[in-house]
Amino acid sequence: MVRNLKTKQRRLLWAGATILVIVSVLFAANAFDKNLVVREYRVRSQKIKAPLDLVILSDLHGSNYGIGQTDLIKQIRGLDPDGIVLLGDLLDRRSSWSDFVALLDGIADLAPTFL
């Protein structure tokens, strides 16, 4: 009986450890995912008389999208926005200021840009 109980405890411990490892790996994979995500939203309002296409950049956390951010800049250029809005978390402590400045330089002529 005691031996059977210890075997069950050992199995539960291994199952718990396995689940913890799987959850940790999934969390890490999601946390470090730096893929560019483009979402499109349509907002209708009687206050807006003409269509307005905005690009909103947020939560880049210093991610690098090509040398000099060229991949991101090409993506924005392809959207042909009426304006670009930079929200928060574009940089973090490990970020390269040169990549951020390259992004600003690259989008400056695409559309009015607001920070």
Image (tube, grey):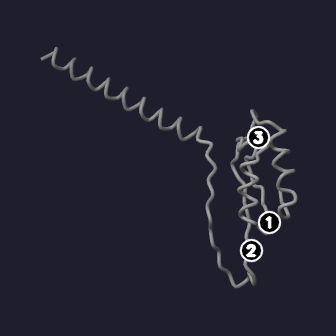
Indicate the quadrant containing the C terminus: top left, top right, bottom left or bottom right.
bottom right
Q: Which residue is under mark 3? A: 67
Q: CA distance from mark 2 to mark 3?
A: 30 Å
Circle nearer the viewer, 2 or 3? 3
As shown in the figure, which amino acid type bears the numbered disc 3?
A: Ile
Amino acid type indicated by mark 1: Gly
- Relative to 49, is 8 on the left or the right? left
Residue identified by numbered label 1: 83
**Among the 4 quarters of the image, the one containing residue 91:** top right
Locate residue 6: give its quadrant.
top left
Residue type highlighted by circle 2:
Leu
| Mark 1 secondary-structure assignment | strand
Lower position in the chain sequence, tag 3 or tag 1:
3
The residue under the point 72% across, 59% down is: 56
Labelled disc at residue 52: 2
Residue drawn 74% across the image and 33% down it: 94
Marks 1 and 3: in contact by CB < 8 Å? no
Q: Position of residue 75 (x, y in %)?
A: 71, 56
Residue most extreme to the left: 1
- How many residues crowd mark 2 within 10 Å: few (<14), some (14–19), many (20+)? few
- Marks 1/2 in contact by CB < 8 Å: the verdict is yes
- Count neighbours of disc 3 (C-alpha within 10 A) and say few if under 14, some if 14 to 19, many if 20 or more: few
Position of residue 17 measured from the top left corner of the image (x, y, whole percent)? 37, 26
In this orientation, which residue lies closer to the viewer: 37 or 73? 73
Disc 1 from disc 2: Cα separation: 8 Å
Name the residue nearer the viewer: 107 or 115: 107
Q: Nearer the viewer, mark 3 or mark 1?
A: 3
Disc number for residue 4: none
Q: Is residue 13 above or below residue 52?
A: above
Question: What's the residue at 76%, 53% (across, down)?
Answer: 73
